[in-house]
Image: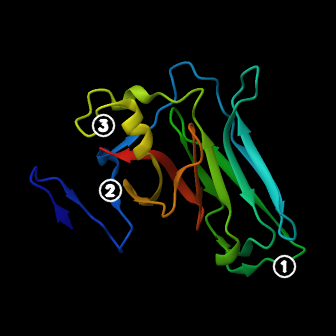
Amino acid sequence: MVCGAAAACVDLGPIGQQTLDTSELLILPLQSGAPTVAAASFTVPNGQSSTHQLLHTDAFNTVYFEIRVPAGAFASVNGDPVSPTGSVTITVQPRPGAYGFTLSPSGVEFVSASRPSVLLSFGQYGDFSAADGSPTYPSRVDYLDALSLWLEVSPGRWQRVSGSGAQGIDELGATIREPGSYVVAAPR
C-alpha cells in the first residue's frame, strides 16, 4: 500500500498491477441519450480466429466493442478441455451508461499465448465531461490520455489490465487474460 500526502492510498498489488476501489476511478460514461448497445452471444470456433462486435443502434452502426479471438484461444471451460475442433459460446454484456463490458461464462480459461484482444470505441458517444473539475486532469485530453481498461477482481475492487491503452484517438484496446467485468476508466 502506497499513501500520498493527501492520505489517499493506492494498493499497487503485484509490480505493475494497480488496484483501486470503484470510488477511486473516473469511469468513462456514455453521453446522455447515446443509442443503446445490446448484449450478444457468439459461438466461437476454437480452430479459427474470429472477430465479433457490439454496435450502437444508430444509423451508422457505430462500434461500441470488438473482440478478436485468435485460433486456439480456449484451453477449457469449467475444467473441461476445449478441442481444436470445438467451440465456445461467449456472452458480452455492455456496462449500462458507461464504457465497459462483462465477458462470460466465468469458467473459460484462455491459452496464455492466444488470448483475445478487445477494443472499445468511444469517440462518438464518450462523455469526457466526467473529468471536468478534476484536480488530477486539467483538461479532457489529459483524462483521455489516462484511460485504461480495468478488471473487477473482487466486488468494488478494480485492477488495471496490463498493456491496455489507446489504439487511436478514440479507441482503447487490451489483451484480456480472463472473463469478468471490465470498465474504461482513469484513477481519480
On the question of residue 111 being in view, the answer is no
Per the image, the residue denoted by label 3 is 137
**Crowd class of label 3 (few under 14; some 14 to 19; many from 20; radius 10 Å):** some
**Residue depicted at 77% across the width and 65% down the height:** 70
108 left or right, relative to 142: right
Sequence order check, earlier mark of 3 and 2: 2
Sequence order check, earlier mark of 3 and 1: 1
Q: Secondary structure at mark 2?
A: strand
Mark 3 or mark 2, which is nearer to you?
A: 3
**Residue depicted at 64% across the width and 23% down the height:** 35
Per the image, the residue denoted by label 2 is 20
Task: Give yes or no for contact between labels 1 and 2 (Cβ–Cβ under 8 Å).
Answer: no
Per the image, the residue denoted by label 1 is 83
Q: CA distance from mark 3 to mark 2?
A: 17 Å
**Crowd class of label 1 (few under 14; some 14 to 19; many from 20; radius 10 Å):** some
Amino acid at dot 1: Ser
Q: How many marks?
A: 3
Q: Secondary structure at mark 1?
A: loop
Q: Secondary structure at mark 3?
A: loop
On the question of residue 28 being in view, the answer is yes
